[in-house]
């Protein structure tokens, strides 16, 4: 019996550029795709569609046009794919990458990201460029034009500073998700949306594996084993981490998000003897969500210093720590515990971390729906 054919693609060197404002994720993705393909850096201020079609800041058709209008004639034109299944949508992403083109997908909360590679494993993972956070939040005004030295990579709190350093399971909302937040009247409601090159569909639809949810003794063991099973540790940068012994694993558990913007998950901080760090997030069933190689120091400090330790277990809303540099949009990353809470009561989004407690196994964590 022949071994299964690997569905890994090349990892394209798409540059990092953050969105200028909360409504610019599609324009930032168009900027990154165009810069990678053409070598020309277009400002997001140049990439405004002529009209707006609410509730979209930039609709899928407009995103397609922003890319195509500036692509030289030798490139394959992009088109919009609206698929009923994740399998068909990911097949479109794979065909783009296999031909050297990045794809743009609609992820959780109708947020656009760029997928610039796939590594086949269990689960298969997508290498992503997430244009968050907003430049207006992390760069002091006046915000400079985008350039090779515009601080986007340095201020990239959600992504990793490594060229291929942020990955997410292709089976999660952080890679692609149904557009369920749109009005039912919208033609894209409930569909998986991909903006990718118009390439012929040759051969069978590719099907990627998801995590098997194999039980593990501890959360940290689950994180390390799942990371190995994705095969990402064979990729450049990641392989340097695994070449040195791990010396510590720190585990924090996010107990519950009060909206579907923040699911319950565990975060494991893996550190090797050289001081390199990988963050891994897992579902409460022990399945792989995402990983980040060498995350920004500011993100690590916020995660593992601001919330460690306090004397209460599950504080009421009024007792949540204020993290003023974070905004609710950062919940598009599975690595963020905290949200600025301006008033006690009922903020739009927040999560409840297990503050001051250590948990080693999934069996020791209460179900996410329990409110204590």
Image (spheres, rainbow, N blue to C red):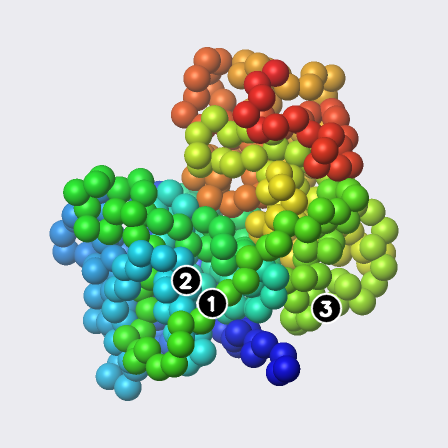
Residue count near mark 1 (Cα–Cα under 10 Å), binned few <14, some 14–19, many ≥20: some
Residue placed under numbered mark 3 in the picture: 239
| Quadrant of the image containing the N terminus | bottom right
The reply to whether residue 232 is in sight is no
Label 1 close to label 3 by CB (< 8 Å): no
**Image position, residue 145 (x, y; %):** 37, 58
Q: CA distance from mark 3 to mark 2?
A: 29 Å
Q: Is residue 77 left or right of residue 99?
A: left
Residue pictured at 17% horizontal, 42% vertical? 185
**Residue 87 marker:** 2
Quick one: label 3 or label 2, which is nearer the N terminus?
Answer: 2
Q: Residues within 10 Å of mark 2 (few under 14, many from 20)?
A: some
Which residue carries the number 1 mark?
207
Q: Are marks 2 and 1 in contact (CB under 8 Å)?
A: yes
Q: SS of the residue at dot 1?
A: loop
Circle 2 SS class: helix
Residue 167 image offset from top left, x and y in percent: 56, 58
For the point 65% across and 26% down, the residue is 366
Mark 1 or mark 3, whichever is nearer to me: 1
Depth check: give the residue in front, 365 or 303: 365
- In the image, 238 versus 300, the foreground residue is 238
Element carrying mark 3? helix
Q: Is residue 199 left or right of residue 52?
A: right
Q: Nearer the viewer, residue 320 or 44?
A: 320
Residue located at (65% from left, 70% from top)? 235
User: Which one is nearer the viewer's eye here, 142 or 245?
Assistant: 245
Q: Is residue 184 visible?
A: yes
Outermost residue, bottom side = 74
């Amino acid at each position: 019996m022949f071994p299964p054919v690997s569905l890994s693609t090349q990892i394209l060197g798409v540059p990092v550029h953050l969105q200028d404002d909360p409504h610019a994720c599609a324009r930032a993705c168009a900027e990154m795709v165009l810069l990678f393909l053409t070598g020309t850096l277009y400002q997001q201020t140049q990439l405004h569609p002529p009209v707006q079609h609410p509730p979209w800041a930039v609709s899928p058709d407009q995103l397609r046009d922003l890319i195509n209008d500036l692509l030289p004639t030798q490139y394959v034109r992009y088109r919009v794919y609206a698929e009923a299944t994740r399998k068909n949508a990911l097949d479109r992403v794979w065909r783009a990458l296999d031909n050297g083109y990045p794809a743009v997908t609609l992820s959780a909360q109708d947020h656009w990201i760029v997928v610039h590679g796939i590594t086949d494993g269990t689960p298969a993972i997508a290498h992503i460029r997430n244009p968050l956070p907003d430049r207006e939040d992390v760069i002091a005004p006046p915000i400079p034009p985008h350039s090779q030295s515009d601080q986007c990579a340095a201020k990239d709190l959600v992504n990793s500073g490594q060229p291929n350093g942020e990955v997410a399971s292709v089976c999660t909302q952080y890679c692609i998700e149904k557009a369920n937040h749109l009005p039912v009247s919208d033609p894209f409601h409930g569909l998986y949306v991909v903006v990718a090159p118009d390439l012929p569909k040759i051969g069978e639809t590719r099907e990627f594996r998801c995590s098997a949810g194999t039980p593990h003794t501890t959360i940290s063991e689950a994180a390390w084993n799942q990371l190995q099973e994705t095969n990402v540790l064979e990729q450049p940068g990641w392989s340097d981490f695994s070449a040195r012994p791990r010396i510590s694993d720190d585990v924090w558990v996010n107990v519950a998000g009060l909206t579907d913007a923040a699911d319950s998950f565990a975060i494991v901080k893996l550190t090797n003897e050289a001081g390199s760090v990988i963050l891994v997030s897992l579902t409460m069933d022990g399945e792989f969500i995402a990983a980040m190689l060498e995350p920004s120091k500011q993100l690590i400090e916020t995660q593992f210093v601001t919330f460690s330790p306090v004397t209460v277990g599950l504080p009421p809303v009024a007792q949540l720590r204020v993290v003023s540099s974070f905004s609710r949009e950062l919940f598009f990353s599975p690595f963020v515990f905290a949200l600025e809470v301006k008033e006690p009561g009922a903020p739009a989004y927040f999560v409840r971390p297990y503050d001051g407690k250590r948990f080693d196994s999934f069996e020791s964590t209460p179900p996410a729906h329990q409110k204590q």
